[in-house]
Image (cartoon, rainbow, N blue to C red):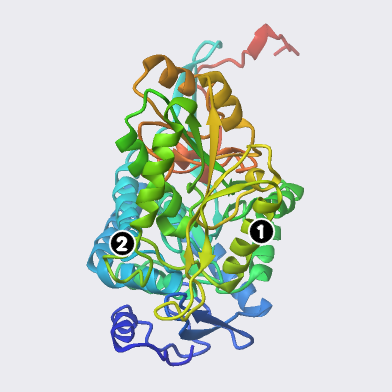
């Protein structure tokens, strides 16, 4: 990695995280193996600066990582789960200690607001706390046997090396959702982060390495492979990895799912969202406005849970549209490290291109602009990654409305009855997050019933964006069907085993079958 050429403040942040420079070819001590071949340049969308250049490992280095991980698993799985939890507790302490610089790095390298960057680190801290408690609750089940003097139970065992492929929009939090749960379950992890945000991953790996080394944990429990899509393809196709957890686009997820499925491996897929809020005639419009605003423009529309559609009742449509337009006029767009800014940049110029193409296509289909979106130019937008969020009046069957555009484009759709609103809501290929704003009990209960939202997440009187780590996170349909984080998701990272013990002196068979051959 070459010396970073950025402003003095960010240089100090990198140095505090231990990534001011890296000796090419050396290991960080816990499984990150820089290669000696091609490089990835990390550019900040905030100001367009090249932060650093990171080397991509070759296939020989990849094999070293896998072999090291397999050896580490043999030892790590034998450490009692509560003791593994103690290691994770220490990781949470370190993430607390580095919350400010790590949050700033997330904000600078990815482009989300500093508050969201700090919030992402807090998610890591929270999942560590959750995993510590979980380490003493990896319970199985017991059941009565139909055979006399027999006992039956189920238990869960560590699964093995787990591959984690994460996206740029949450460069560290989603990794932690997987890794901290996997660690307490006795698994080891191999992380392939987005090539757009490699420094965030390197910073986390260095923090993990220090904690693991201090505790004498074998090298290879936590591994990092920095690379492009080829590295992800290696992980997905590797039979030595029983589980691949992948976050990204639906297109990427279909490829990963097909590859992993072909080798009969397991996959957790967290893919695209096309999330909507139904705003009822019985809604508190103040709550609805605040929920819709953050949901639509937070992270510059680059969350899988971003609000992309507002399905608004005829009786409140005009009033809510006017309130929304006024609120959009108050948005401050600029450097996300400035806490007064509401909207930061898109991740790169490719994202800007897709934003422009989407606006062009939605107009061609008949979309009516309510707030015109545009690319912002001049100072302080020299990076070319800043855009003005857009609002369009559309029909749900427009082709562009059926697709997820990872940018701040919000679609408004009218409805008359709650049944119509739910039909519109569900009539997209994706099924991640959903919400209804209403104080009408019948409407809210219908929305949460089997006849309501078909998404993995359904909320009442809060928006689509933002999730607590205690609940299972994930969606249905083209969102992939996977679940991460809380609830009983830990079972995905373990193999299930049914045990039967005979403590009698005979061998009776189940279902009353007799198989006697005499004494």
Q: Quadrant of residue 508?
A: top right
Q: Which residue is mark 1?
A: 360
Q: Quadrant of residue 76?
A: bottom left
Pick the residue in front: 467 or 319: 319
Is residue 235 something one can see in this rendering?
yes
Residue 62 place in picture, x, y as percent: 62, 73
Residue 336 place in picture, x, y as percent: 35, 69
Q: Residue at x 51, y 76 (%)?
A: 384
Do the CB atoms of the residues marked 2 and 1 lie less than 8 Å apart? no
Q: Could you tell me how many numbered marks the image carries?
A: 2
Pick the residue in front: 149 or 116: 116
Q: Residue at x 42, y 14 (%)?
A: 442
The label shown at residue 480 is none
**Lower sequence index among marks 2 and 1:** 2
Residue 207 place in picture, x, y as percent: 34, 71
Q: Badge 1, how many Cα within 10 Å: few under 14, some, many 20+?
A: few
The label shown at residue 91 is 2
Q: Residue at x 55, y 74 (%)?
A: 226
Q: Residue at x 60, y 79 (%)?
A: 57
- Give the SS element for disc 2: helix
Q: Quadrant of the C terminus?
A: top right
């Amino acid at each position: 990695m070459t010396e970073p050429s950025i402003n003095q403040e960010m240089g100090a942040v990198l140095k505090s995280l231990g990534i001011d420079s890296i000796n090419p070819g050396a290991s960080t001590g816990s499984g990150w193996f820089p290669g000696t071949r091609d490089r990835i340049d990390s550019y900040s969308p905030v100001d367009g600066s090249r932060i650093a250049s990171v080397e991509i490992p070759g296939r020989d280095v990849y094999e070293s990582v896998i072999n090291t991980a397999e050896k580490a698993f043999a030892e790590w799985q034998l450490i009692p789960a509560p003791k593994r939890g103690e290691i994770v507790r220490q990781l949470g302490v370190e993430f607390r200690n580095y919350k400010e610089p790590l949050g700033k790095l997330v904000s600078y390298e990815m482009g989300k607001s500093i508050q969201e960057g700090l919030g992402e680190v807090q998610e890591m801290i929270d999942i560590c706390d959750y995993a510590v408690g979980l380490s003493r609750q990896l319970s199985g089940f017991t059941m009565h046997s139909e055979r006399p003097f027999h006992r039956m139970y189920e238990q869960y065992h560590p699964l093995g090396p787990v591959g984690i492929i994460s996206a740029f929009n949450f460069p560290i939090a989603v990794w932690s959702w997987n890794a901290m749960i996997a660690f307490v379950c006795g698994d080891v992890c191999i992380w392939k982060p987005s090539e757009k945000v490699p420094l965030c991953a390197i910073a986390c790996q260095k923090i993990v390495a220090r904690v693991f080394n201090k505790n004498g944990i074998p090298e290879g429990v936590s591994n990092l492979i920095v690379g492009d899509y080829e590295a992800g393809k290696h992980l997905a196709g590797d039979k030595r990895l029983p589980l691949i957890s992948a976050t990204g686009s639906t297109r990427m997820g279909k490829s990963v799912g097909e590859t992993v499925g072909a080798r009969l491996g397991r996959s957790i897929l967290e893919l695209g969202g096309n999330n909507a809020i139904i705003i009822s005639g019985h809604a508190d419009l103040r709550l609805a406005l605040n929920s819709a605003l953050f949901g639509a423009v937070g992270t510059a529309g680059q969350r899988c849970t971003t609000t992309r559609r507002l399905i608004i009742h005829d009786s409140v449509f005009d009033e809510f549209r006017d309130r929304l337009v006024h609120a959009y006029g108050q948005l401050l767009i600029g450097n996300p490290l400035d806490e007064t800014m509401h909207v930061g940049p898109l991740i790169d110029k490719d994202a800007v291109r897709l934003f422009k193409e989407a606006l062009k296509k939605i107009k061609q289909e008949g979309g009516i602009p309510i707030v015109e979106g545009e690319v912002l130019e001049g100072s302080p937008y020299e990076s070319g990654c800043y855009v003005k969020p857009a609002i369009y009046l559309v029909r749900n069957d427009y082709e562009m409305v059926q697709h997820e555009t990872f940018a701040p484009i919000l679609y408004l759709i009218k409805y008359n009855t709650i049944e119509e609103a739910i039909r519109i809501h569900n009539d997209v290929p994706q099924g991640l997050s959903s919400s209804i704003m209403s104080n009408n009990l019948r409407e809210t209960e219908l929305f949460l019933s089997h006849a309501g939202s078909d998404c993995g997440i359904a909320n009442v009187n809060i928006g689509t964006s933002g999730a607590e780590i205690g609940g299972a996170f994930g969606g249905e349909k083209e969102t992939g069907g996977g679940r991460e984080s809380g609830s009983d998701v830990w079972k995905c990272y373990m193999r299930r085993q049914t045990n039967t013990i005979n403590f009698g002196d005979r061998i009776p068979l189940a279902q009353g079958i007799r198989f006697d051959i005499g004494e």
